[in-house]
Image: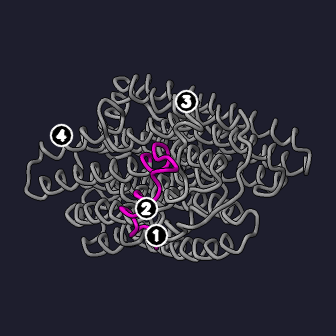
Amino acid sequence: MSTLVPLLVTLPLLGAGMALIAGRHRKTQVAVSVTTLSATLAIALVLLFAVDASDQPLAVSVGGWPIPLGIVLYVDRLAALLVVISSVVLLAVLLFSVGQGAADGDDDTPVSIFHPSYLILSAGIFTAFIAGDLFNLYVGFEILLVASYVLITLGSTESRIRTGVVYIVVSLVSSILFLAAIAMIYGALGTVNMAQLSDRMGELPPDVQLVLHLMLLLAFSIKAAVFPLSFWLPDSYPTAPAPVTAVFAGLLTKVGVYALIRTETQIFRDSDVNFMLMIVALATMIVGVLGALAQAELKRILSFTLVSHIGYMVFGLAIATEAAIGATIYYTVHHIVVQTTLFLAIGLIERRAGSTSILRVRGLMRAAPVIAVLYFIPAINLGGLPPFSGFIGKYGLFDAAAEVGTPIMIVLIVGGIVTSLLTLYALMRAWNLAFWREEEDSAETEARIGYLGSAPAAGVQTERRVIPRIMTAATAGMVVVTLALTVFAGPLYAVCARVGATLLEPISVVQVEQGVEE
């Protein structure tokens, strides 16, 4: 079974090479990309069932080099689950982009560049999830970041180049911090293998541990868009093409969250910065959602809610109990799917209405009822209405916090509830203005929300375009996946709970070596 593990990285890389060779043969590139991601999804499902049934991780030492000299690929429940969810999202967004490319040609997403870059991005995401050491986690980040630099500037418009430069500079700063921390850890402990670091970190003086800990926290918090290091995200994501924005919003920040979860629970479990994380989580939730309320452009609203809901994940991580970590994993899976779905739905709105400004878009309930449904379901899910997965995840976090019962936990619960209500308000206000408002209501409505007229990008208008069926089908498929998170919440939450239980146990070097041998 362990022989399947390297395929999670090699298949997308091989697919990228084949797509690049295919050049401008659109159908060939599409076939290669869809086949590659479908095969990766199938392999990830097999690995998830295998590691969950056996209760043992799978580890592969690339090239046969012994630990810690070789590159170790490590697949436990957490890694396998996130690879499965990522594969689903990447495949759905790819199909969405295929429809957009077929309708628009190379105007927005040049096919010869898009498909190879997209598959390299996928390889980077998978590498980060299954890396068994910090350096190869860094390599995974750099692979996906290099691809993201290309994708975020597709079309070479002025706004994309400008925001792309900010994104690149911020990403490079984060990478430099991460690499410096890796060098210091290696100098102090003689290894960057996570299993060995889990055993050896306690040998260092507490002040040295704290410095190393804070450096990694800072690097990963930039990548995860944790406040106040989230300033770059609301301006960077909305300018990219719709499929690029969707996959960035759903996955890239979650790779940073994954790195936080992995290092906090298994490397620095004895270094207590949980109170600081609680304050940061509360600030991220509140500041993010207040930013969303001040926006008049749908992509910017969602970008700020993206920042806000990262706070829930940091909240669960700061609680640091098995129940809280399990709820955090479930909420992360929920947010990957729901956030991606909402950005795809907004891509449909932009094509149908020619704008994503809630001051300009109106009457879509009558003109495009299917799009109305595709936006409404994930919107109320993100807002946390029962019985959807957003409510289940938040309830799990609040319940875990209530079990601890300290005053700061009560404050965080209240902050989380307020954030959820404000998220629902921001998304439903957009729903009311874009879908229910008719032409004759415009003067009265704009008088009531005139303060939004000065919001960024509120006046942007583009041409209306035809919506290919495959774009609608891909978005509808993602809506079905969001509903599946609710329908199958029981078994999925049980898997996440098992992840939470195992993450708080130290990684055993012997266990990893046994996985390699098997």
Write down the region rendered in magenta: 431-454
Badge 3 density bin: few <14, some 14–19, many ≥20, Cα 10 Å: many
- Residue, disc 4: 399
Q: Name the image quarter holding the N terminus.
A: top right
State whether residue 457 is above or below residue 302: below
Circle 4 or circle 3, nearest the eye: 4
- Residue, disc 1: 453
For the residues labelled 4 and 1, the Cα–Cα distance comes to: 40 Å
Query: Which residue appears farthest toward the front when viewing the image?
Result: 440
- Residue at figure coordinates x 54%, y 46% from the top left: 130
Residue 351, visible in the rendered structure:
yes
- 334 horizontally vs 374: left or right: left
Tell me the amino acid under the disc marked 1.
Answer: Gly
Q: Is residue 441 magenta?
A: yes
- Residue, disc 3: 47
Tell me which label, 2 or 4, sits earlier in the chain: 4
Magenta span: predominant SS is helix
Circle 4 or circle 1, nearest the eye: 1
Tell me which label, 4 or 1, sits earlier in the chain: 4
Badge 1 density bin: few <14, some 14–19, many ≥20, Cα 10 Å: some
Tell me which label, 3 or 1, sits earlier in the chain: 3
- Tell whether label 3 touches label 4 (CB within 8 Å): no
- Residue at figure coordinates x 13%, y 44% from the top left: 402
Q: Name the image quarter holding the C terminus.
A: top right
- Residue at figure coordinates x 46%, y 33% from the top left: 482
For the residues labelled 2 and 1, the Cα–Cα distance comes to: 8 Å
State whether residue 456 is above or below residue 373: below
